[in-house]
Image: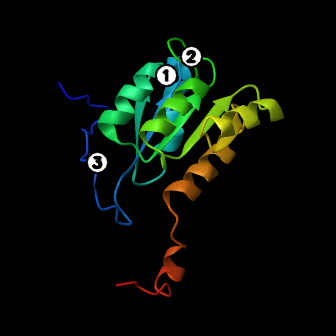
Amino acid sequence: MPIQCLGYTPRPRVVARFFGMTKHILIADDSAFLREQLRLAIERHPGWKVCEAVDGADAVRKSQQLAPDAVVLDLRMPEMDGLATGRRLKQLMPKLPMALFSVDTSSYLKNAAQASGIAAVFSKTQWNQLLGWLETMLNPLPPTRQRARVPFAA
């Protein structure tokens, strides 16, 4: 039976991604409270939808079925921690943007995260920085007024 998360079903792996399509973000954290608060913050952005995973193994399963546009991982989770999850997702989906959301943001952790294929590490007190990173990763086109000036490549 396919996985469903908060109103969306698995998408085909090869999908044309046009500007304006819904972007799907997977949040993996063992704290239901944090997942809910982060989901509410992320879904304030028009066109962003969230799927939740309760641990790293669940995140890998859901990522394979749902093909999210970005993943936000907690560091400490049961089954599989954030770094191990990042390594596994990097093997399965090499271009998937991933961020680690943790209390610890030491340079050691940032280096370990980068070695695991995780692009960025944010403190759990840096919600705005995480949301800004998601904006950069998910909306690479310039603002609407500038978009008309970008030449179309045929």
The residue where tag 1 is placed is: 56
Q: Decide if residue 31 is on the left or right side of residue 152.
A: right
Distance from Cα at disc 2 to Cα at disc 3: 27 Å
Q: Residue at x 53, y 47 (%)?
A: 97
The reply to whether the C-beta atoms of the residues labelled 1 and 2 are less than 8 Å apart is: yes
Residue 40 in view here: no
Q: For residue 13, which numbered disc appears in the image? A: 3
Name the one closer to the observer, 65 or 103: 65
Q: Tell me the quadrant of the picture where the C terminus can be found.
A: bottom left
What is the x, y in percent for residue 88? 49, 30
What is the x, y in percent for residue 139? 50, 61
Q: Tell me the quadrant of the picture where the N terminus can be found.
A: top left
Q: Quadrant of residue 6?
A: top left
Q: Residue at x 73, y 25 (%)?
A: 103
What is the x, y in percent for residue 14? 28, 54
Distance from Cα at disc 3 to Cα at disc 1: 21 Å
- Mark 1 neighbour class, 10 Å CA radius: few under 14, some 14 to 19, many 20 or more: many
Q: Give the mark nearer the N terminus: 1 vs 2.
A: 1
Residue extending farthest to the front is: 91
The residue where tag 2 is placed is: 77
